[in-house]
């Protein structure tokens, strides 16, 4: 189980807001905190969770592989933190000899910070917005109303054609799922849980669909923590 703390504020309510949240991670997945302890978490992953390497990588290249992974993780963590991220989650152990290309981020989002907006009104609006190439549906997370948005992320081929080769190779279409929910008993605070995966390169494949289902199952374990 992964447990994360939320930065404490003092809203004018009698009921104490949650201290953080908890969720159950699949085997081989880890949490990287983004507000503090990021460096220590990366060190732990590098030396404790990455004893295995994908098939086809010679033993002599194992350390180079781990260092390359460390750089990629640092890059992901920096990008997630810039976007209000609280925690980054991703798989660090290979399954069937390969590493899964997937991740999700829990982040705070600026909804209702200027003026108080009833959570249900926000959820209704988000659920009624057009999602290009996808859908938005009302759901519940931890017994409270939320919105699930699912769509596909593609790239502007014309702009991409003039990008460096490394950028073009890394620009894979992805399946994305986002849950948006209010922090209970803490008016004006919202979080999102954002998942992204290119799957096996085919966004319609069974394998890619299984990864999306896995993420939905993880969100199903989400609970607020009051300790």
Image (tube, rainbow, N blue to C red):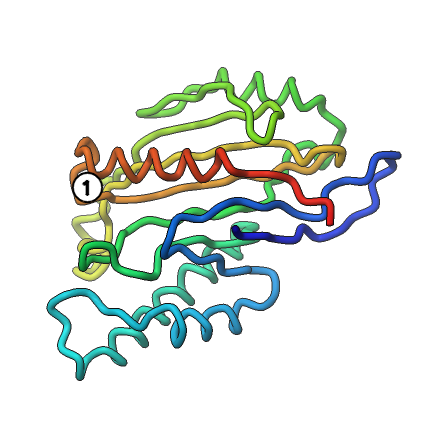
User: Considering only vertical position in the picture, is 108 above or below 151?
Assistant: below
Task: Check the image and name the residue furthest to the bottom.
Answer: 60
Residue count near mark 1 (Cα–Cα under 10 Å), binned few <14, some 14–19, many ≥20: few
User: Considering only vertical position in the picture, is 65 above or below 142?
Assistant: below
User: Considering only vertical position in the picture, is 71 above or below 24?
Assistant: below
Residue 193, position as x, y percentages in the image = 50, 40
**Rendered image quadrant of residue 123:** top right
Q: Which residue is mark 1?
A: 157
Q: Is residue 2 left or right of residue 164?
A: right
Of residues 76 and 104, the one nearer the viewer is: 104
Q: Secondary structure at mark 1?
A: helix
Q: Is residue 185 left or right of residue 133?
A: right
User: Considering only vertical position in the picture, is 148 above or below 104?
Assistant: above
Q: Which residue: 52% across, 56% down?
A: 82
**Rendered image quadrant of residue 183:** top right
Q: Which residue: 64% across, 18% down?
A: 121
Residue 181, position as x, y percentages in the image = 59, 31
């Amino acid at each position: 189980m992964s447990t994360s703390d939320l930065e404490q504020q003092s809203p004018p309510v009698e009921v104490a807001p949650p201290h953080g949240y908890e969720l159950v991670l699949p085997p081989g997945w880890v949490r990287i905190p983004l507000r503090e302890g990021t460096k220590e978490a990366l060190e732990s992953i590098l030396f404790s969770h990455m004893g295995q390497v994908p098939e086809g990588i010679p033993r002599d290249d194992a350390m180079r592989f781990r260092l390359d992974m460390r750089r990629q993780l640092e890059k992901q963590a920096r990008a997630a933190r810039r976007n209000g991220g609280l925690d980054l989650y991703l798989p660090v152990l290979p399954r069937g000899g390969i590493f899964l290309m997937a991740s999700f981020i829990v982040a705070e989002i600026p909804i209702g910070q200027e003026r108080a907006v009833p959570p249900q009104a926000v959820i209704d609006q988000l659920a009624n917005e057009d999602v290009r190439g996808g859908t938005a549906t009302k759901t519940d997370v931890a017994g409270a109303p939320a919105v699930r948005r699912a769509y596909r992320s593609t790239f502007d081929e014309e702009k991409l054609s003039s990008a460096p080769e490394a950028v073009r190779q890394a620009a894979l279409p992805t399946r994305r799922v986002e849950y948006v929910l209010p922090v209970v008993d803490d008016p004006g605070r919202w979080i999102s849980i954002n998942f992204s995966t290119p799957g096996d390169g085919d966004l319609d494949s069974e394998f890619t669909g299984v990864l999306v289902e896995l993420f939905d199952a993880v969100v199903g374990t989400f609970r607020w923590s009051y300790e």
